[in-house]
Amino acid sequence: MQGQVTFSVLTESHEGPIGDNWRYWIEAKVFNRGLQGQGRINVQRHTLLSGTTQEPPGPPVPIEMPAGDYNNQLKVKLTLEATEIDLFRNDVGKTDIDLCLECPKPGECPCVYDREISVGVIESPTIMGRASIITLKARLVLSCC
């Protein structure tokens, strides 16, 4: 039997002084003895004030991806790129994390994994040294088909 991953973004938050107009994308790649599936959630320009946590606009539709054989441990790579939109030059930060997850067996309930991923975005020019942190709470639901 094959596993399946449903990938979604639950919340977004911003801490820092560099701006409140943001866009970002987050990508998930599922590996199980090779790449099994991948998907990207794009969130277009919107206002995200410092000190706030909110649901992303939309909210974005969850993405379903194959996970391969449920007997094997999965590696999921999450990559986040956030852009603070400026009049002359946008400021961009990018990061990734790797997760090792287990699929449920046939007949078992789906496994829900909530993970935070944060990226620092430094204002250009870097002379001022101002930075903001964007944090997303992502959800990965693993099930056996």
Image: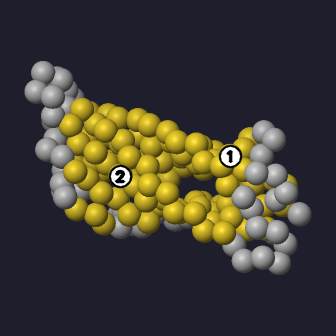
Can residue 47 be seen here?
A: no
The kind of secondary structure element at disc 2 is strand
The kind of secondary structure element at disc 1 is strand
- Sort mark 2 into few (<14), some (14-19) or many (20+) by Cα contacts within 10 Å: some
Whether residue 57 sits left or right of residue 68 in the image: it is left
Q: Which residue, given by chain and number where applicable, does mark 2 sit on?
A: 135
* Residue sitting at x 67%, y 55%: 101
Residues under labels 1 and 2: Cα distance? 21 Å
What is the x, y in percent for residue 16? 18, 46
The quarter of the displayed image where residue 10 is located? bottom left
Examine the rendered structure and indicate whether residue 127 appears above or below residue 81.
Answer: above
Examine the rendered structure and indicate whether residue 28 appears above or below residue 56.
Answer: above
Q: Which residue, given by chain and number where applicable, does mark 1 sit on?
A: 75
Number of disc labels: 2
* Residue sitting at x 49%, y 57%: 115
User: Hey, what amino acid is under mark 1?
Assistant: Lys
* Residue sitting at x 66%, y 49%: 100
**Quarter of the image containing the N terminus?**
bottom right
Single out the residue that lies furthest toward the right.
1
- Sort mark 1 into few (<14), some (14-19) or many (20+) by Cα contacts within 10 Å: some
Can residue 31 be seen here?
A: yes
What is the x, y in percent for residue 7? 58, 60
Of the residues under marks 1 and 2, which one precedes in the sequence?
Answer: 1
**Quarter of the image containing the C terminus?**
bottom right
What is the x, y in percent for residue 109? 72, 77
